[in-house]
Amino acid sequence: MSGLGKGITAASIGRILKNRGFAVTAVKIDPYLNIDAGTMNPGQHGEVFVLSDGGEVDLDLGNYERFLDIDLSSRHNITTGKIYRSVIEKERRGDYLGETVQIIPHITDEIRSCIRSAAEEGIPGEGPADVCLVEVGGTVGDIESMPFLEAVRQMRGDLPHTDTVLLHVTLIPEDTMGDLKTKPTQHSVKALRELGLLADLIVGRGERPIGPHTKRKISAFCDLPVQGVVSAATVPDIYQVPMEMEKEGVAEVLSSHLGLAPVKTNNEWYSLVSREYTSRVHVAVVTKYGIEDVYLSIKEALKHAGRALSTEVKITWLDAERHEEHPLGEFDGVLIPGGFGKRGLEGKIEAIRFARTQKIPLLGLCLGFQLSVVEYARNVLGWEDATSAEIGEGKHVIAILPEQEGVTDLGGTMRLGNYPVTLKQGSLAMKIYGQKEIIERHRHRYEVNPVFLPELEKGGLVFSGIWKNRMEICEIPDHPFFLATQFHPEFRSRPTRPAPAFLGFVEACSSQRCRG
């Protein structure tokens, strides 16, 4: 069912296979009618993750990139909207030669074609993939997922038996007596069978591990070997899931089904996630949404940086409209994330002012970068009416990008994806990145207004990252750590390769704590 952990399960299985030397890619199928996740409310759907090619996708693709340490493209996120749009465009061009266009075969053929296309796309730096994970989102039985499940059934029939494995992630709830219940699993397996799909592995999700008795029961009722029933209990850290699934023998079962030759296991991942913390920092993230999933990549990037520094990062999520209820002086660092709309902006600006004047390490991202410029203009340069064109009337030190003027369609029209950034020699940005040219991912419509740039720089604000005439990074000298980026460094952070901006921030927070 939806929200059960299929994405983490798929990503973990991919990591297990990658640890054994196989090249793994991934596809996420979202049955909703949206073309992509870009226009969806993050408060309802969670974070919109941005890919290197500018694709706005489901947050599960972020998990795939982090677990597999690869870059995916827009074709790795398939939605009902994309499928139907493609089929209708083909029909309008006459590609079907007058046929009556139907769900079967035209929609299912398009789905299969998209899966194959994504699977055959090479992995940057690795070449072709050995294994492609395909996650079908939603819940078994939902009307919108039916064409996708039918396409999967057809593909299973087309391909050799050893070329596919079907994993079914299912809930194993507890009753009031603490007994694990298998009826939901039995019924969902039955629903799958009615669609012509037989599970090769069942991954049972629950708060605690599944014991041998429950595994035997599921095996008997769902007609698969006991070793095909895998326990996936909740763990403190999602990066421990591959290690726990290894203990369940998942690698051996998959290798047997797919005929994969055994190779030596690389244990680097397990050594990384098992590393003990020697210190701790406490960071305030000043948000406009009180939901962690909206800022999932930020949470994970802080975790990546902390693990690299053997420093546990404790996060407190503060409402931008009520952050004064929890004084910022209690924290080792302040992070101002991205976002859209007017709500909570003045609270974020006040948080930036406090961090600047009280010498608390600050990291601003996207909107956090823009508001850092607004705060500096107001409280250092004395421009009381300084603001962003997104907020309202006043001196627009933040203006809409020229190419965004007159844009009416909201979907996929922002400045999106990878762009290069040139760093200024001797700057904090140059120090933490260690190179002059970097590439980072973007998602914004507004920028620093070039009209006010000379006065901002004369007033002491340093723009240390630039792309052509666009300001990408700002910082303040004589501050423990004040760095704000127009881009989103969190989208490129990996457990094995933390984002430099986050690494520098957590290191500064740790130094701040030592001074305190």
Image (spheres, helix red, strand yellow):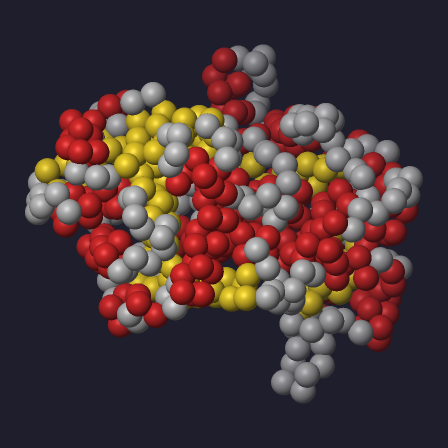
Q: Nearer the viewer, residue 162 or 353?
A: 353
Q: Is residue 110 above or below residue 459?
A: above
Drawn side of residue 13 relative to residue 35, left or right: right
Drawn side of residue 45 relative to residue 118, left or right: left
Q: Position of residue 481 (x, y in %)?
A: 37, 50
Drawn side of residue 194 relative to residue 28, left or right: right
Q: How many marks?
A: 0
Q: Is residue 172 above or below residue 458?
A: below
Drawn side of residue 53 relative to residue 7, left or right: left
Q: Position of residue 490 (x, y in %)?
A: 48, 45
Q: Quadrant of the N terminus?
A: bottom right
Q: Position of residue 131 (x, y in %)?
A: 76, 37
Q: Taking the image as drawn, is residue 405 in sight?
A: yes
Q: Nearer the viewer, residue 434 or 114?
A: 434
Q: Position of residue 9 (x, y in %)?
A: 67, 54
Give the residue displayed 46% in from the left and 28% down from the top: 436
Quarter where residue 239 is shown: bottom right
Q: Nearer the viewer, residue 98 or 231?
A: 231
Give the residue displayed 50% in from the left and 49% down from the top: 503
Q: Nearer the viewer, residue 445 or 191?
A: 445
Q: Quadrant of the C terminus?
A: bottom left
Q: Taking the image as drawn, is residue 81 in sight?
A: no
Give the residue displayed 25% in from the left and 46% down from the top: 371
Give the residue displayed 72% in from the left and 37% down from the top: 24
